[in-house]
Image (cartoon, helix red, strand yellow):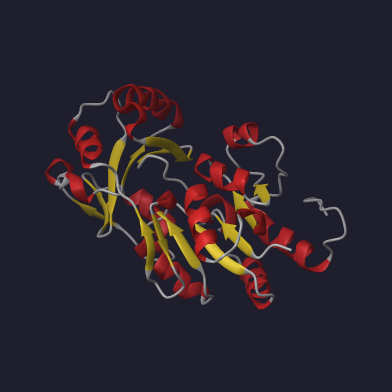
């Protein structure tokens, strides 16, 4: 019996429109009524997720910024980590061979230097938005993570360039095909969930988790039950071939699995039924 359920948001719990489906909300309510602790584990910013959690109206722990922050159900911070200032300084002031847009995140919000209104569609539910700034003038000691957004093939080349420059001073991760993130060392959803479990006197074996991108890998491989979305990145499916693949976020597959788990756990699960 799982005692905690951790959910990635975009591409997993949310519909492709980045909104929560009615069936999914019903399943989360049923899970809460059974005494299962809810945790939303996402690359999204805390300010973004606070607005989303208010709309869901369920008590849930928040793992945000891909593990850089953990907050309890009342909004109090349990854990936080930031990029080393020297790493942030180097990433922001170096010339990278890429047309990717650059995005800085800290506790104050999301910052970029060019208007990209298309990116705001993913945050329509919360109203969260970027602020335009000269990124080179931002203090390096106030950077939680840095994201590059561009087509996947361009980001693959950039990842190699960043790895050569930064070495083991930062972690690099695809939170989506078009989003490459520079994160603090050993900072990911898996480590954050382990910290949360320790705080709640649980083990990772007591948890189930759902995800679709490479920033979910550590979380999915460490929990007692990890589930990969049918729409997940190919790299995630390849890296965790032993984990079951459920349906697509478009059909609210997380809800479909949870309903099965709560009503007929003795039967084999099939995403097609």
Q: Residue at x 50, y 64 (%)?
A: 199
Of 39 and 246, the residue lying toward us: 39
Is any atom of residue 178 visible in this view?
A: no
Q: Residue 136: x and y, percent?
A: 14, 40
Of 77 and 99, the residue lying toward us: 77
Tell me if residue 199 comes above or below residue 177 in the rendering.
below
Q: Residue 180: x and y, percent?
A: 40, 37
Tell me if residue 87 comes above or below residue 188 in the rendering.
above
Tell me if residue 189 comes above or below residue 238 in the rendering.
below
Q: Quick one: quadrant of the C terminus?
A: bottom right
Q: Quick one: quadrant of the N terminus?
A: bottom right
Q: Residue at x 57, y 67 (%)?
A: 38
Q: Residue 68: x and y, percent?
A: 38, 52
Q: Residue at x 46, y 38 (%)?
A: 174
Q: Residue 34: x and y, percent?
A: 69, 75
Q: Residue at x 17, y 33 (%)?
A: 93
Judge left or right: residue 51 versus residue 90: right
Judge left or right: residue 138 versus residue 219: left
Tell me if residue 18 comes above or below residue 245 in the rendering.
below
Residue 128 sits in quarter: bottom left
Is any atom of residue 253 visible in this view?
A: yes
Judge left or right: residue 225 versus residue 218: right
The residue furthest right is: 267
Of 18 and 87, the residue lying toward us: 87
All told, the count of numbered labels is 0
């Amino acid at each position: 019996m799982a005692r905690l359920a951790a959910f990635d948001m975009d591409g997993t719990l949310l519909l492709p429109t980045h909104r929560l489906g009615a069936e999914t909300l019903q399943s989360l309510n049923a899970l809460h009524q059974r005494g299962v602790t809810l945790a939303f584990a996402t690359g999204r910013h805390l300010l973004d997720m606070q607005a989303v959690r208010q709309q869901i109206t369920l008590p849930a722990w928040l793992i945000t910024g891909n593990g850089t922050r953990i907050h309890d159900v009342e909004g109090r911070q349990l854990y936080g980590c930031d990029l080393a200032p020297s790493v942030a300084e180097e990433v922001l002031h170096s010339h990278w061979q890429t047309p990717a847009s650059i995005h800085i995140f800290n506790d104050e919000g999301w910052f970029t230097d060019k208007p990209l209104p298309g990116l705001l569609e993913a945050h329509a539910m919360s109203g969260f938005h970027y602020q335009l700034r000269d990124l080179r003038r931002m203090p390096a000691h106030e950077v939680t993570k840095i994201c590059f957004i561009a087509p996947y093939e361009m980001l693959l080349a950039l990842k190699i360039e960043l790895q050569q420059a930064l070495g083991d001073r930062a972690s690099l991760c695809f939170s989506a095909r078009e989003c490459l993130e520079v994160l603090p060392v050993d900072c990911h959803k898996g480590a954050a969930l382990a910290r949360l479990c320790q705080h709640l006197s649980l083990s990772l074996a007591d948890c189930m988790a759902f995800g679709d991108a490479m920033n979910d890998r550590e979380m999915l491989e460490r929990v007692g039950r990890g589930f990969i979305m049918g729409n997940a990145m190919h790299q995630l499916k390849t890296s965790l071939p032993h984990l079951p693949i459920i349906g697509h976020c478009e059909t609210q597959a997380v809800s479909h699995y949870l309903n099965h788990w709560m009503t007929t756990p003795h039967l084999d699960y099939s995403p097609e039924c």
